[in-house]
């Protein structure tokens, strides 16, 4: 039994500095904690492991929130059951194997920024990221709301200096809804360290936000795992070798993206958006 932590990916931004993208985590899946997964959620665990190819050792279960966590990605523990039993989930090619992408619910996504928890220095990057995603497909529309109770997606933060993830994002729950949470880790962004919100540029923050929104839409990391691939997209090895191959790499690069309105989706991203949400052009 592996007692020690395994390497868990996290999203980092790179331009001038090479940040560590991996961390030791105490959240790994040991056999001990594995036993704590309720039987009703083992099918979701197996889905992530067997279908999506996420190594079991990098998946941890959080009993309090009933979620599985793998790096910066958070999965609703009821994912499998939702997929199987939610009748509103039509089986179309836009459903990405009917597992993650929730085509029908992506056109009117209301997001709420918690003003007390979401830091000001990500306001601009998030707004630009929303603008780019909204322009990527006629079937993707994020709109900000001031009404928390009406929101499909809550954007806030947590503070864990021992967690080297910059952010945690929930993926679609399998019931037709997009992922409902984006949480910045202030423990990284604001700690007194060589990487924080001051040392990272607006463009790096923009990519982090684009990456997070991609997770809420159902996209996994392009450069990881040997599970199912979106048809027509390159395999993980390609993305490991190509820094600008996708905004959904586990480590994102700026790759020319900026506050200029110029869309720089990679061919792989375009294919993925076309598959999931019908790319606009
Ligand atoms: Zn990620």
Image: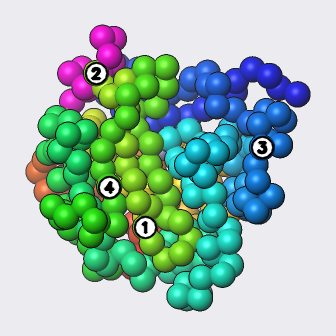
Tell me what residue is drawn at x 43 percent, y 20 percent.
Answer: 161
Mark 2 / mark 4, whichever is N-terminal: 4
The disc, 3 or 4, on the residue closer to the chain's N-terminal end is 3
Q: Single out the mark in the foreground, 2 or 4.
A: 4
Q: Residue at x 37, y 34 (%)?
A: 158
| Callout 2 touching callout 1 (CB < 8 Å) | no
Relative to residue 30, is residue 274 depicted above or below?
A: below
At label 1, counting other C-alpha atoms closer than 10 Å, the crowd grade (few under 14, some 14-19, many 20 or more) is: many
Judge whether residue 231 is colored magenta. Answer: no
> What's the residue at 28%, 76% (across, down)?
108
Label 4 and label 1: CA atoms lie apart by 11 Å
Are dots 4 and 1 in contact, CB under 8 Å?
Answer: no
Range covered by the magenta-colored residues: 191-201
Spatial CA distance of label 3 from label 1 is: 27 Å
Bin the neighbour count of mark 3 within 10 Å (Cα to Cα): few under 14, some 14-19, many 20 and up: few
Query: Within the magenta stretch, is there residue 196?
Result: yes
Q: Which residue is mark 1?
A: 178
Q: Which residue is mark 2?
A: 190
Can you give x and y, in whole percent of width and height, for residue 127 in the image?
Answer: 17, 53
- Using the numbered discs, state the Cα–Cα distance from disc 2 to disc 1 in whole angstroms: 28 Å
What kind of element bears circle 3? loop
Query: Label for residue 234?
Result: none
Between disc 2 and disc 1, whose residue precedes?
1
């Amino acid at each position: 039994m592996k007692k020690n932590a395994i390497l868990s990916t996290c999203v980092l931004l790179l331009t001038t500095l090479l940040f560590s993208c991996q961390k030791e985590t105490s959240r790994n899946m040991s056999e001990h904690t594995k036993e704590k997964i309720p039987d009703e959620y083992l099918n979701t665990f197996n889905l992530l492991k067997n279908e999506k190819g996420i190594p079991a050792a990098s998946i941890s279960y959080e009993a309090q929130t009933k979620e599985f966590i793998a790096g910066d990605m958070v999965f609703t523990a009821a994912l499998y059951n939702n997929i199987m039993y939610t009748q509103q989930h039509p089986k179309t090619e836009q459903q990405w194997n009917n597992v993650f992408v929730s085509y029908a619910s992506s056109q009117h996504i209301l997001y709420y920024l918690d003003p007390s928890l979401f830091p000001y220095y990500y306001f601009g990057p998030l707004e630009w990221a929303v603008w780019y995603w909204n322009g990527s497909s006629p079937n993707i529309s994020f709109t900000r709301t001031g009404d928390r109770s009406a929101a499909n997606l809550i954007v806030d933060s947590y503070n864990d200096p021992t967690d080297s993830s910059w952010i945690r994002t929930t993926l679609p729950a399998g019931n037709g809804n997009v992922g409902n949470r984006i949480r910045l880790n202030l423990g990284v962004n604001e700690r007194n360290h060589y990487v924080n919100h001051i040392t990272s540029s607006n463009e790096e923050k923009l990519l982090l936000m684009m990456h997070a929104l991609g997770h809420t839409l159902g996209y996994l990391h392009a450069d990881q795992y040997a599970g199912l691939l979106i048809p027509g997209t390159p395999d993980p090895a390609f993305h490991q070798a190509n820094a600008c191959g996708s905004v959904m790499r586990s480590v994102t690069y700026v790759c020319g993206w900026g506050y200029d309105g110029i869309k720089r989706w990679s061919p792989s991203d375009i294919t993925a958006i076309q598959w999931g949400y019908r790319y606009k052009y």
